[in-house]
Amino acid sequence: MAERNTEQIEKIRDVVAQDLLSGRIDLLLGWEKGHYWWQSRPLFARSKKDLDKLVWDPFCAVNLSRYLPDELKIHSKVGVLVKGCDARAFNRLLQDHMVQRDRVVLYGLPCPGMLDYSRLAEEAGGNLVGLVEQNGRVILKTDSGEKEAERKDLLIEKCRDCLYPNPVVYDQMLFSPQGEKSAPERFKVVEELENLSAEERFAYWEKELSRCLRCYACRQACPYCSCRECFVEQENPRWQGRAYQTSENFMFHLVRAYHGAGRCIDCGECERACPVGIPLQELNRKLIKDINELYGDYEAGLDAELEPPLLTYRPDDPAAFSEK
Amino acid sequence: MPRIGIFICHCGSNIAGTVDIEKSIEAARGFPGVVHVDEYRYLCSELGQDLIKKAIEEHNLDRVVVGTCSPRMHEVTFRKAVTEAGLNPYLLEVANIREHCSWVHKDIEKATPKAIALLRAAAAKAALNDPLVAPSVEVEKRALVIGGGIAGIQAALDIAEAGYIVDVVEREPSIGGRMAQLEKTFPTLDCSACILTPKMVEVAQHPNVSLLTYSEVEEVKGFVGQFDVKIKQKARYVDPVKCTGCGICYEKCPAKTPSEFEMGLAKRKAIYVPFPQAVPNIPVIDRDACLYFRKGRCQICAQECPPQAIDYEQQDQIIERRYGAIIVATGFDQMNPSHYGEYGYGQHPDILTGLEFERLFNASGPTGGKVVRLSDGKPPKKVVFIQCVGSRDKARGMNYCSKICCMYTAKQAILLKEKVPDAKSYVFYIDVRTAGKGYEEFQRRAAEEYDVAYLRGQVGKIFPESDHLMVHGVDSLSGKTIEIKADMVVLAVASVARADAPEVGRLVGINSDSYNFFNEAHPKLKPVETHTAGIFIAGACQAPKDIPETVAQASAAAVKVVGLLSKDMLQGEACTAEVNQAECSGCLYCEAVCPYSAISPVEIEERYHGGTLKRTVVEVNPTLCHGCGSCTVVCRSGTINLKGFSNEQILAEVDAICLQR
């Protein structure tokens, strides 16, 4: 079991319970424990009683904003707990006109970064049964004893290079913000791939994408995938072949990545959701890097008022393609 | 199953020389849905068209593919032919096997399979072609001319004379443009003002013309027949109805600033008319120079104005009007030659550009018409003219010839001799270009009767030395170095596109060449049209040109406009975007990128979990849509589709080329 962060959970509960009671919101999107103690899954709380299940622990990785468009079809006002990435996802959805600002109450949770169970288990060695956090360190409890490790080494992939742990948009910030972060290695893998020859690069992706099951979990978790009918499911024209083969996997992932050009908020949910561990975020980051280089620095989701570069025309926009 | 007929054109030997027609026919017979294949030497001829019409009837064809030249050339011809045979024109498909195949290849063995692939793709697309109907668009019988120089004036007069209403937008306080700045015109030495001002007055007084001076076009939307234009009429701070044009205001105004009209060689007042013959003769107040606007004190003009026409409270006005057609006649600028360090422009008052020198001849110019040195007021005895400053110069200027400099230099040398009889002119030139009626004779006169020394060669450096300018050059014919102790140097600088031409081009939706001159639709056959229907160009905004050429082009553009306005209705675009609202997620990206504002959000209701749900989707206004396809590109789910170029059709073409090699 992870140690319960009782004080913070009580604070969250107090605030949102009041809003649920007063009718400011009809639904709260939060997290509750999943099947295992190291899983936290979305909680859909309609009443104060539902809030008993609420948790805020180092496993609340799921991006809750992704659930807003559907929930707003049934509920008139929805509250949502937002970490840095959930808040940027909200801006993404706002720019895509998938949510309405005045129908959502955002409770900001500065995020320390979420922990990766497989990294914890590996670090622990034995059968991991719980953990305690202490000043940036994690004490891992196993059947056979305890082991200590640096917290930053146990983060899930998407949190390692997170630049914005604090919500960039909120109605109410619940805790004091996390310190500034830098992510010097954000584009490290992309740069390594760029330096490969075209053949080597193709071989790399062929190997990675050959594992894809086309379960579309990446798409389901993604805040930029908001189409009513995804191109992969369309029959006429049939963009996506149904065959289970690598070339069709390429078709899916490359087209999806292009649909995220200038829109991906780099929340890494696709990669986290992938059951076979394809480094999907590197595809998105390649496009983020390209857009930054072509059109100047742009961070999708930071500011919903800022026009995405691919939806704006400036006379000095570059026209050339580089054939690297 | 469609019944497709394929017709392959030899185009003489244009196609048949590089594409094996027999093999192509054989292959085409095997394409899905093809029931008839034929060929002809010139399919665009009457006989060729008849061949298609007869085949449609005999073989009951419902789709026609022609393997011919580019659809830009003859799509209209063949659409008309199939319409006459009773088919919808959009059931015709053109396979461009000339420009895309025979003309760009030499090897018949390789070109033939490519032609067959193009035909197969066209047949696959044609099978999915739907009959389309183009909407009719009403023509607004009013024209807009942007620019009130001689081009704009001439175009407006011709349109007005044909009986149509025309507005002229001029950003300066007066119409007249560059021609108004000239003293005399070559090759007849007419006084420029004497031939221009009657036209200025005529256009101002014409009942069909509205002059919008001191105004700028802010926005152009819409399309041929219906351009919706926003024009900003800048505040003059003078009531045009009350003002009598007496001129007391600018006589009394204490604030001075460099005059744009005099190329900065003289000062004007803060309240001013640019030149004495200005039309309209209503002053404007230059806010940046006016003491009242800058410091809140003065108001002398208001106190002195007899009819009390000064109105400091006046605001910029936005005028919104619809026009059927637009002529862009925005003129040209002079290149600033400061980067030619050897000529020292800007570092000595006696080194002038051609247009600056021109102003010295003018009676109302900075020297009152006396040709004198600006340094000491003495008449120049030796004047050196340098040609091609910035023209025909790949390295530091423009590649092109500015066309007017040889002639105006000859003119200025003649005028100089008449004003200062003991003056001697030297002209350094690369070539003397005098193509034009009476031009060669005029230039010879300058050389022979007015003692102008033409020196083929270049100037390497100009040094000011006591009260002279030492001009060091080379005579490339003799190879000798030349040194001239000149009193004055005149640089024939390049004519360049207006600095803001790219912005104007974007505003009205026309493109420019690499020098920012506006592009004509065809360099020979469509010299006044642009690639945007309903927008025409005239004058030096297209390329450097002299007055006769400008006037001719302006009249030509006017004829095009008159022809357009004489129609009540135009046929709009049939290939427009359409939305599948059920699948539209309402992200509105298409609305953001649509250049024609043809896409707008709309709320629909749909059933959801037993209830109804309101949600936003988009709709397309087919009369505004131009079928550019930008929306289809940003629509990630392919929910917005272009009629006539649908995703299904394009994929069918791709499949036909890729899958069946």
Image (cartoon, rainbow, N blue to C red):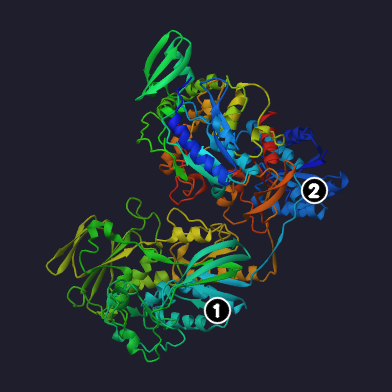
Residue B436 visible to the viewer: yes
Nearer the observer: mark 2 or 1; the answer is: 1
The secondary element bearing badge 1 is classed as strand
The residue where tag 2 is placed is B52
Residue B463's spot in the image, x, y percent? 17, 61
Of all residues, the one furthest to the left in this rendering is B466
- Using the rendered image, report if marks 2 and 1 lie on a common chain: yes
Q: Is residue B580 above or below residue B174?
A: above
Going by the image, does B442 lie left or right of A259? left
Q: Residue B167: give x, y in percent of width and height.
A: 54, 74
Packing grade of label 2 (10 A; few <14, some 14-19, many >=20) is: many
What is the quadrant of the C terminus of chain B in the image?
A: top right
Amino acid found under the numbered disc labelled 2: Ile
Disc 2 on helix, strand or loop? helix
Q: Nearer the viewer, residue A165 or B1?
A: A165
Between the residue at mark 2 and the residue at mark 1, the CA separation in whole angstroms equals: 49 Å
Q: Chain of mark 1?
A: B
Closer to the camera in the image, A283 or B167: A283
Quick check: B268 left or right of B53? left
Question: Could you tell which of marks 2 and 1 lies nearer the N-terminus?
Answer: 2
Q: Residue at x 45, y 68 (%)?
A: B436
The subunit carrying tag 2 is: B
- Which quarter shows the N terminus of chain B? top right
Amino acid at pointer 1? Val
Q: Position of residue B563 (x, y in %)?
A: 64, 69
B160 or A307, which is in the foreground? A307
Nearer to me, B521 or A144: A144
Q: Position of residue B383 (x, y in %)?
A: 24, 70
Q: Which residue is mark 1?
A: B209
